[in-house]
Amino acid sequence: MPLQAESRSLGIATAINVGFVFIEVIAGWYLNSIAILSDALHDLGDSLALLFAFLSVYYSQRKAPIHYTYGYKRLTLVAASVNVLILIAGSVMVVFFAIPRFQNPLALPSIPYLILAAFGFVANLVAFAIVHQGHDHNHRVAALHLLEDVLGWAAVFVGGILIHWFQWYWIDPLLAIAIALFILYNAIRQLRLLFREWLVAAPYKINVEELTRQLQQLLYPNRLLDFHLWSVAPDLWIYSLHIQIPASMQKEEQILLKRQVRDFLAQTTDYATLHVTIELDYPEESDHCHCHET
């Protein structure tokens, strides 16, 4: 999907979600439904995630100032961290307000409740269908967020049916607590991944020990003196290697060695762009490269 089409599809999905969040907040307040307000929090988090994905695609099309040598790639990390903190604080607040309501449930008008749940299900399903057409990392993550929303509204709709037929008003705060705990669980899990990125850890899907072992086998009899891998963003990985080679190695052999390493590292991901720096050191240089042999 072209970049302009990518940003357009994410922009449409974001607009649908943001618009519906306002409807949810007003309706949830009017209907006295803490479950709808909880789902509004969920949709707010997903709206922010969609907005950040949209901005990420948008800014990737623009030339960054010279000081930002990797562009605006880590903008998504900053934005995602803010998003997660908002979701954690919001979900804790929902649980705090839902527990007393669970003990003393309030009567709810079931028909408006069901209409809003059906509308929410359809709106998020449309947004999911739009975003699902993309195949890049941003679209995959955004589609997952929207699929969660579709399932959340399906649960609220079922809750509305139970309220309508059996007057089980305690279902509303129960759904609110369930949705809030679901948000809290995923937010904390996401926070752990973000913490790894802030500390420039290797991408979490990579087994660094196994990758190092395979590199050492590939390079033998040459020595892997130093090896680093980190992610600037989910779709941009940085590799840095120091390889000790014999002084007798010819230029053509050095070029072939570098090509073999780059081809091998390209197999470690099917979606990220790799920035690989390979430095070849002669034995007499090893003491001055400030390397830690792996």
Image: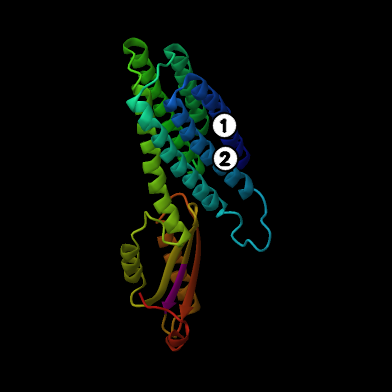
Confirm whether residue 134 shows in the render.
no
Write down the residue under mark 1.
Answer: 18
Dot 2 amino acid type: Leu
**Residue 134 picture location, percent across and down:** 51, 37
Tell me if residue 242 is in the magenta stretch: yes
For mark 1, does the 10 Å Cα neighbourhood hold few (<14), some (14 to 19), or many (20 or more) residues?
many
Q: For this rendering, which residue is in front, 60 or 169?
A: 169
Q: Which mark is residue 164?
A: none
Q: Secondary structure at mark 1?
A: helix
Q: In the image, what residue occupies the spot 36% across and 20% down?
A: 159
Q: Position of residue 282 (x, y in %)?
A: 45, 84
Counting residues from the start of the chain, the first of labels 1 and 2 encountered is 1
Amino acid type assigned to the residue bearing label 1 in the image: Val
> Is residue 29 within the magenta segment?
no
156 versus 268 height, above or below: above
Considering depth in this image, is 139 or 147 the residue closer to the camera? 147
Q: Which residue is mark 2?
A: 51
Location of residue 283 (image quadrant)? bottom left
- Give the magenta part as a residue range: 240-244
Q: Secondary structure at mark 2?
A: helix
| Residue at (43% x, 87% y) in the render | 287
Numbered disc in front, either 1 or 2: 1
Q: Do tag 1 and tag 2 residues touch (Cβ < 8 Å)?
A: yes
Whether residue 24 can be seen here = yes
**Dominant secondary structure, magenta:** strand
- How packed mark 2 is, by other alpha carbons closer than 10 Å (few <14, some 14-19, many 20 or more), is many
Residue located 40% across and 61% down the image: 264
Q: Is the residue 224 above or below the residue 285 in the image?
A: above
- 41 relative to 59, above or below: above
Judge by depth and name the residue closer to the eye, 79 or 255.
Answer: 79
- Counting from the top left corner in percent of width and height, residue 17 is at 54, 30
